[in-house]
Amino acid sequence: MASSGPQTRKHDNHSDHLVQPTNPNVAAMQEDVLYHFSLSTSTHDFPAMFGDVKFVCVGGSPTRMEAFAKYMAKELGLDHPGAEYPNICRGTDRYAMFKVGPVLSVSHGIGIPSTSIMLHELIKLLYHAHCSDVTVIRIGTSGGIGLKPGSVVITRQAVDASFKPVFEQVVLGKRVVQRTHLDEELAEELMQCALDLLEFPTVLGNTMCTSDFYEGQGRLDGALCSYTEKDKQKYLQAAHSAGICNIEMESSVLAAICGACSIPVAVVCVTLLNRLEGDQVSSPHEVLVEYQQRPQRLVSHFIKKRLAAAQNPLNL
């Protein structure tokens, strides 16, 4: 029987670490309805459906995550003519979920609130399925700061819009602050995979997570704008000086929630533009499609490398 209380565990390559939410109430529930996934412990056999999951890859777009699932099927040799990859969450339009072998591909929508809801239900899903040694990786897009469009950023530290490594929310009327540390060894391992490939520019750097796409990221092209171009440039240059390489809207909540549950998590995002040079994404569609495939190729290489090492541990 799984423990009903929070656990603190160190991650290594030699023992199983069951996914465990920190909420003790979950273990006492007779039925757990994952409403936004359209799944329930009373109607679905979670261990049978998800028990072999080792990698969870998340991204904003349902279409992108379906494409990633199909790509992983080919990369893992699990694809075959006529193969279908049904959306496990087809009973809802909130999120999409696809499974290929040990890889679960899940959409999280845009922003911290949507991602937070997905993570709560995802972690409970993995817990009910008795999953162990799970790694979570966000693959997505971002705005770069001082980087060429198409560069891939592996996040070293997620920070807020004040450049602080924290995630804040109000719980029962009180402000709760959590740290946003990502798994350093996992980030380094992903960087080594980028060096293996040498297909596109990749950097390790800090990522700023904001709660808004326009004013929250210093854009001049929204419906509202309360600052000047000079103000914007001063802010972005300060971010760049603080080691921030890109801006997106989900990394801090991923770091906070997965970190609280001792799940290794990484963020791998491609930059679609250099924010020091403009605010709007103007590259041709076919270029953007290729850019968005770069994190997928990197993470695919990482997964295949991990699986090969698991089959041949002496080659580590």
Image (spheres, rainbow, N blue to C red):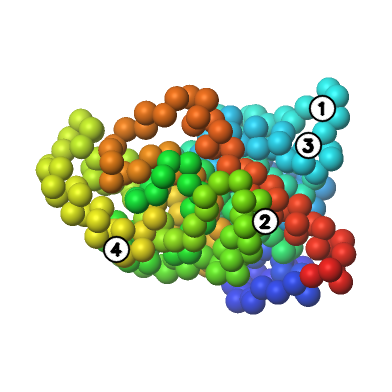
| 22 up-or-down from 121: above or below | below
Give the residue displayed 31% in from the left and 44% down from the top. Answer: 275
Q: Mark 3: which amino acid? A: Lys
Task: Classify residue 112 as left or right of residue 34.
Answer: left
Q: Mark 4 packing: few (<14 Cα in 10 Å), some, or many (20+)?
A: few
- Where residue 229 appears, as percent x and y from the top left, is 15, 43
State yes or no: discs 2 and 3 in contact (Cβ < 8 Å). Answer: no
Give the residue displayed 65% in from the left and 32% down from the top. Answer: 67
Q: Mark 1: which amino acid? A: Ala
Q: Which residue is mark 3?
A: 74
How far separated are the C-alphas under marks 2 and 3? Answer: 20 Å
Disc 3, SS: helix
Residue 196: mark in rendering? 2
How far separated are the C-alphas under marks 2 and 4? Answer: 29 Å
- Where residue 139 appears, as percent x and y from the top left, is 56, 46
Q: Earlier in the sequence, mark 2 or mark 4?
A: 2
Q: Which residue is mark 4?
A: 241
Front tag of 2 and 3: 2
Q: Mark 2: which amino acid? A: Asp
